[in-house]
Image: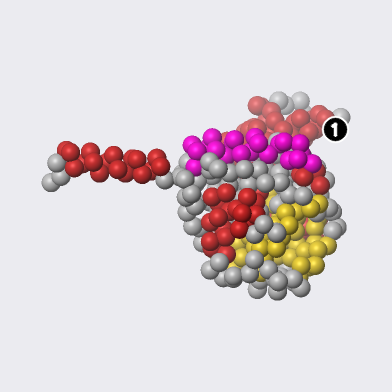
Amino acid sequence: MKSLAQFCFAFCVAALSSFAAHAGELVRDYPLAKIAPHTYVIHGPLGYPSVENQGFMNNPGFVVTHDGVVVIDPGSSLQAGRMLLKQMRTVTNKPVTHVFDTHIHGDHWLGNQAIMEAYPKAKLMGHPDMIKKLSDGEGAQWVATMEKSTAGFTKGTRAVVPDVPAADNAEFKIGGMTFRIYAPADAHSHTDIMILAVEDSVVFTGDNVLNQTIGRLVDGTFKGNIAACDKIATINAKHYVPGHGPSGDVTVVTNYRQYLATLFNTVKQQYDLGQSDFEMKALVVANLKPYQNWSRFELEVGPNIGLAVMEIEAAM
Ligand SMILES: [Zn+2]
């Protein structure tokens, strides 16, 4: 049996090492999935950025071209981006030549720093309005949010801002592959691009599509997001990688569209009947039965009803 002193020693060492562990630490590994001949995705856990998930909860992906690697959404921190690179090296030694950031929310692009640290010549690409907003300083709040929600795990992360615009309908030929950009207006964040890797028939949707989880549509619009889903569904690609949650076929898109449309249409109908957002909530929740077990549903359904009401009133 251990003495009290031994126990204290072991405990203190454990406590100290967990306190000091963050400097240079990587986000823990999540499985790397090959979803198409050249395309790989790490599906992050669902939920908000936290101490437990080390702030990592998005779906970083990459496409291995003839000349190098194209990364999509390298994650929420320097530490997440380094984890992505570590896993990437298990399948290729080619350098990263390009990064597409799907939108301005920090959980998707703060990993840019890790890519540029390892591959300073890589081109960072994003929506023109994302580049503008981040160049005006909007990145600092995302750095601070991540650090706070992880109790300092992401310390050392800086906002490394894309500088190559990827606008609607742009097409990039990279290493023998084709990347087509869809930039829907007023969808999830007003800075969204969706990327079709043509030869692999894979669409990276950013947060215009989520699976098994919902977010708060605080920087976008329901109508624009629904239109974005419709647009990207018509491509009928083989694979869709949502911003969060498992990848799948086009039903991932149509299912999320159904969630958005059911919420918005129920709110509109009840609003027209004179109901307040509080009064209509029970009916909205009942109509969203297939989504009630999705991550964050209980916390986010109320705020989303409020946002739908605001959108309806703004259109009047
Ligand atoms: Zn996100």
Residue at x 23%, y 41% (from the top left corner):
9
Give the side of residue 1 with respect to residue 308, left or right: left
Residue at x 67%, y 46% (from the top left corner):
160
On the question of residue 129 being in view, the answer is: yes
Name the quadrant containing residue 201. Answer: bottom right
* Front residue of this view, candidates 245 and 309: 245
- In reply to whether residue 22 is colored magenta, the answer given is no
Give the side of residue 72 with respect to residue 53, left or right: right
- In reply to whether residue 141 is colored magenta, the answer given is yes
Quadrant containing the C terminus in the rendered view:
top right
**Circle 1 crowding by C-alpha within 10 Å: few under 14, some 14–19, many from 20:** few
Which element is circle 1 on?
loop
On the question of residue 241 being in view, the answer is: no
Q: Which portion, as a residue range, is magenta?
A: 132-153
Name the quadrant containing residue 285. Answer: top right
* Front residue of this view, candidates 176 and 276: 176
Q: Where is residue 17 in the image (x, y as percent from the top left)?
A: 36, 44
Name the quadrant containing residue 97. Answer: bottom right
Give the side of residue 249 with respect to residue 127, left or right: left
Residue at x 68%, y 68% (from the top left corner):
68
Write down the residue under mark 1.
Answer: 315
Q: Position of residue 310 (x, y in %)?
A: 76, 30
Q: Can you say whether 208 is above or below 250 in the image?
A: above
